Amino acid sequence: MSSAQIDYDSIAEIYDWYVDADYDIPFFLEETADVGGPVLELTAGTGRLSLALIQAGVQLTCVDGSRGMLAVLSRKLKDRGLTAEVLCADVCRLDLGARFRLALLPFQSFMEITGEPRQRQALAAVFACLVPGGRFVCTMHNPAVRRTQVDGTQRLVGRFAISGGSLVVSGVERGGRPLVKRLQVFEFFDGDGRLRSKRLLPMAFELVERDRFETMAREAGFHVLALYGNYDRSAFDADRSPVMIWILQRARVQPSAAAHEAQAARRRTRRSSGVALAGAASSVR
């Protein structure tokens, strides 16, 4: 991940044991279906989304700040006979040239870029990677909803079967105005239920308000095509929507939001798979 606060290298080899979310994959398959050119996936991690896109024929460049996470992704690509460009880079300091028709920042990961200076750097860097008319899909939690979980209570993420025992993942969060400090806890148990080891991962992410993000995006040169409140493309509701899904475009002329929605509707008619709704997740990614 791009954020220096989170040491994803330390959990790269166990990440796939406890993260299997796929609720957003149909949405991103729709967004990439008609691109007809290279696509940039930021914070690609171990390939939770990447593999589905590549298997669908997307010409993908995968970027992440964690070499450990990308090592796992590279192994998966090799094992499956798939091909993608894999780059270790900070999202805020991309220098890839204006060659992408679409950039994706999934799994609410923009929020791990903390502080307005770095957030503005990231938006400018993504803008510079896009061809004129290129789109940027940026996903974030809705602060009003996500903040309700930031109360100092340790919450269970899940219990997961692993070789020789189980892994229990939980987390506790404090703050939220706007920075959230999260401590992710990993407990490894043997087959008899005895605790073998414990690992802690400090995390930080920022609850970015709608108006501030829109201002930063527009000042970076983006036009807003759409703002969805969930992966079913429902309209954003400031009080109830779990996420903010921004569809931005690098363009000289303000495009029609209605035209984008019509294009999205055409994509939906070609795909019969349902889209699971995203709840307020206990972590960013």
Image (tube, grey):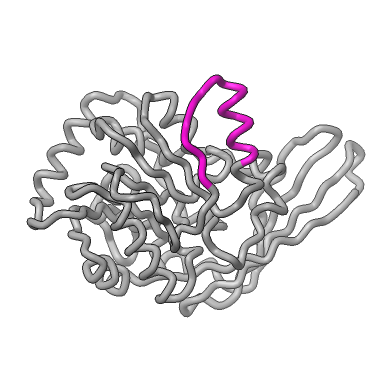
The answer to whether residue 87 is seen in the rendering is yes
| 72 left or right of 273 in image | right
Residue 34 higher or lower than 167, as above or below: above
Question: In the rendered image, which quarter is residue 276 located in?
Answer: top left
Residue 202 in the image: state x and y as whole percent: 67, 66
> Where residue 125 appears, x then y in whole percent?
36, 60
Image coordinates of residue 72 in percent, x first then y, are 64, 38
What residue do we see at 64% from left, 52% from top?
157
The image quarter containing residue 36 is: top left
In the displayed structure, would residue 235 be above or below residue 3? Answer: above
Which region of the structure is painted magenta? Answer: 71-87
Q: Give the quarter of the figure containing the N terminus.
A: bottom right
Which residue shows up at 36% across the image and 70% down it?
120
Q: Is residue 144 visible?
A: no
Q: What residue is drawn where x is 15% and y is 54%? A: 251
Q: Residue at x 85, y 45 (%)?
A: 189
